[in-house]
Amino acid sequence: MPSDLSGSVRTRADVDQPRDAELAPVAPDRSVEAGLDALDTAASAPARRRPWRTLTHSVLPPVVFLAALVAVWQLVHVAGLKPSYALPGPADVAATFWETVTDGRAMEAIWTSISRGGIGFAMSLVIGTLLGLAMWASTWLRAAIGPIVSGLQSLPSVAWVPAAIIWFQLTDAAIYTVVLLGAVPSIANGLLTGFKQVPPLFDRVGRVLGLGGFSRIRLVLLPAALPGYLGGLRQGWAFAWRSLMAAELITYSPSLGQGLGQLLNIGRELSQMSLVITAIALILLVGVAIELLVFAPLERGVLRRRGLTTDR
C-alpha cells in the first residue's frame, strides 16, 4: 500500500512538472534586439563608398563614353564622309577651344550667360512660386489657367523671341522675357504637382494645430511638397537655360555683350565649324556643371532627410 501511494505521488509530480515548466518565465532573446539595433545603426549610418568605387561608378563611365565618341568622330573625319569645313577633326576643335579659353572669349561668354540665366531664373522662381501657390489655393484659377500654363510649358521657347524683339527691341528685357516665359510654367506646375502629392491628412493636422493659411503652407505643406517642387525647379532651370540660348542666338547686338549664344552665332556667320562646336561644348559644360554642383546635391539632401536614400 505505501508503495502504491508513493507511486501515485510520483506519478502526480511527474504530471505537474510540465505545467510548472510552462509557467516558468522565459528569458528574453537578446539576439533579436541586437539584430534590430544593428539594422537601425546600418540604416542611420551608411558606409561611405570607397574612392575606387566612386571612380569606377561615377567618373569612369562618362570618360569612357567621351573617349569612344571622340574615336568615332575621328574615324568619320579620316574617312572623309563630310568635308573638313563641315566636320573638322577633334584636333582642330581642341585647338579652337583652347584659343577661345586663352584669349578670354570663353570666360566672357560664360559669365555673361550665367549672369543672365541667374537673374532670369531668380525672377522666374518668384513668379512661378507665387503662381503655383495661387493655382493651388483657388480651384477656379486652377481650372481657368491650368491648361494654359501647361500649354506654355510645351511651347518652344524660340517662338517667343520674335515677339520679345518687337516688344522690347534688342535689349536685355527681350532676353529676360523669353527666359521668364520658358521657366515660369515649369516652376508653377512643379509646385502644384508637389502640393497634389501631399496627403490631405497633413493639411488637417496643420488646421488642428491652429496654423493659419500662410503658416500652414510654410511649415507643413511646402516642406512636404519639396521633392516635387525641386523637380519643378530643375526643369525650370533647364527651360530657362534653353530659352536663354535661343534668345542670345537671335538677339545679337554689340550692346548686349557676347554670351554663349552670341558666340555660337558668330561661328555660324563666319562658317567656322570649329567655333560652333566649341560654343556647343561650352553650353553643354555649363549645363552639366549647374546640374552637378547645384541641383544634384539639393536632391540628395532632400531625399536623405526623408530616408529615401542611403547614398552619401
Image (cartoon, rainbow, N blue to C red):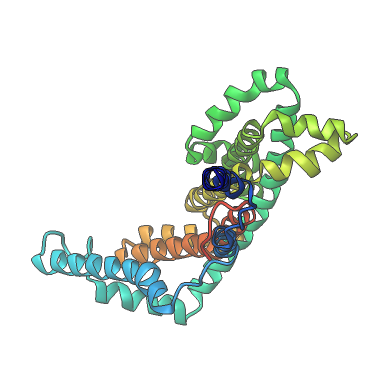
Query: How many numbered circles are shown?
Result: 0
- Residue at 47% across / 37% down in the picture? 156
Q: In front here: 7 or 232?
A: 7
Residue 306: x, y in percent? 63, 51
Residue 123: x, y in percent? 70, 48
The residue positioned farthest toward the bottom in the image shown: 102
Q: Is residue 254 visible?
A: no
The residue positioned farthest toward the front in the image shown: 1
Residue 203, quarter of the rendered image? top right
- Residue at 44% across / 76% down in the picture? 50
Q: Quadrant of the C terminus?
A: bottom right
Q: Using residue 134 as the reference point, say whether residue 17 is left or right of it.
A: left
Q: In which quarter of the image is the N terminus?
A: top right
Q: In front here: 28 or 256?
A: 28
Q: Is residue 148 visible?
A: yes
Residue 99: x, y in percent? 40, 79
Q: Using residue 56 as the reference point, say whether residue 155 is left or right of it.
A: right
Q: In front here: 113 or 192?
A: 192
Q: Using residue 33 as the reference point, say whether residue 136 is left or right of it.
A: right
- Residue at 85% across / 31% down in the picture? 207
Residue 308: x, y in percent? 56, 51
Q: In front here: 157 or 84?
A: 157
Is residue 153 depicted above or below 5 in this figure?
above
Is residue 273 depicted above or below 189 in this figure?
below
